[in-house]
């Protein structure tokens, strides 16, 4: 008699039906387990897994489009032991689609190989991609979207050295939300170091220059970079008492890239704020 196999977790449901008896259980790879969002297909074991507190992964959003998501990343590869035939790619995709729908999530994209899923849980946006490319299993990639915790901030002495040697210097650790010009709170340490630089040399005057990637139009990016430069100037004046006459904000948009805009890592490097000695 056919045996229905299903597993229910508080946040996900994956169901698989098959008339074959279960294969001999195989142990998961050391240190590996399911992500809390999904159970596994019946009789599968974890062949390998990787996790990173902060990384990125591309998620397919269309036939020729993708979105790169950054945050806490998990990659879990499931395999089926010798015995029963593997589920079809469609069965794997539909199982995960139903599981994500059951907790309020959506299917972003699917084709014969991939399914991209998205859900909001506990205040986090979570992306998941199912890759059914190989024969007796599938790979599940999950990213819990979040901003990186900035641990490295250049200091006033390094800013001074950069200005003296090349006339300009990048200020790492300044953050804005996408397409916005409001400084995020985690920018405060970097802004404080710029203020320290200016207070140490009362004669120093600088341009605060905003840069963007080439996403969107030139007009939009010029306007955005100007607004971001002005936001940094305003923070230095209002929060740190720097005289406005010593600061000039300028936005150059995508006109002075330091890397190719063809990939996300290059675009991320191009989104920056620099100081230029007047």
Image: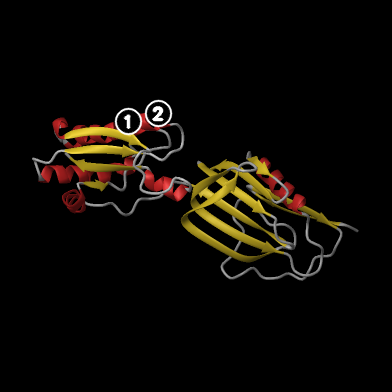
Looking at the picture, the colour scheme in use is: secondary structure
Q: Is residue 187 above or below residue 180?
A: below
Query: Residue visible at 31% across and 34% down?
Result: 251
Task: Identify the secondary structure beneath mark 1.
Answer: helix
On the image, the x and y values in percent for residue 106 come to 64, 39
On the image, the x and y values in percent for residue 185 come to 32, 40
Q: Quadrant of residue 103?
A: top right
Q: Is residue 181 left or right of residue 193?
A: right
Residue 227 image label: 1
Mark 2 neighbour class, 10 Å CA radius: few under 14, some 14 to 19, many 20 or more: few
Q: Is residue 127 left or right of residue 245?
A: right
Q: Nearer the viewer, residue 2 or 253?
A: 253
Query: Residue visible at 46% across and 37% down?
Result: 215
Q: Quadrant of the C terminus?
A: top left
Identify the residue position indicated by label 2 in the image: 219
Residue mark closest to the camera, 1 vs 2: 2
Mark 1 vs mark 2, CA separation in Å: 12 Å
Q: Is residue 51 left or right of residue 115?
A: left
């Amino acid at each position: 008699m056919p045996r229905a196999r299903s597993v229910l977790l508080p946040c996900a449901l994956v169901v698989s039906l098959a008339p074959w008896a279960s294969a001999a259980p195989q142990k998961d790879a050391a240190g590996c387990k399911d992500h809390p969002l999904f159970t596994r297909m019946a009789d599968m074991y974890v062949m390998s897994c990787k996790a990173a507190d902060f990384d990125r992964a591309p998620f397919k959003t269309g036939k020729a489009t993708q979105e790169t998501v950054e945050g806490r990343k998990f990659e879990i590869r499931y395999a089926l032991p010798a015995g029963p035939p593997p589920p079809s790619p469609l069965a794997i995709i539909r199982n995960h689609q139903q599981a994500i729908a059951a907790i309020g999530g959506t299917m972003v994209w699917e084709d014969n190989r991939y399914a991209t899923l998205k859900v909001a849980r506990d205040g986090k946006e979570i992306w998941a991609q199912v890759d059914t490319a190989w024969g007796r299993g599938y790979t599940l990639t999950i990213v819990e979207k979040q901003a990186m915790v900035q641990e490295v901030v250049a200091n006033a002495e390094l800013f001074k050295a950069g200005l003296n040697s090349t006339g300009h210097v990048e200020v790492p650790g300044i953050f804005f939300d996408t397409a916005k010009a409001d400084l995020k709170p985690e920018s405060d340490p970097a802004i404080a170091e710029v203020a320290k630089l200016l207070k140490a040399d009362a004669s120093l005057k600088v341009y605060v220059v905003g840069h963007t990637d080439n996403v969107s139009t030139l007009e939009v990016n010029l306007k955005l970079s100007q607004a971001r430069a002005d936001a940094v100037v305003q923070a230095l004046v209002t929060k740190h008492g720097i005289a406005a006459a010593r600061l000039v904000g300028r936005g150059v948009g995508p006109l002075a890239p330091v890397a190719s805009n063809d990939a996300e890592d290059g675009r991320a490097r191009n989104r920056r704020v620099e100081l230029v000695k007047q």
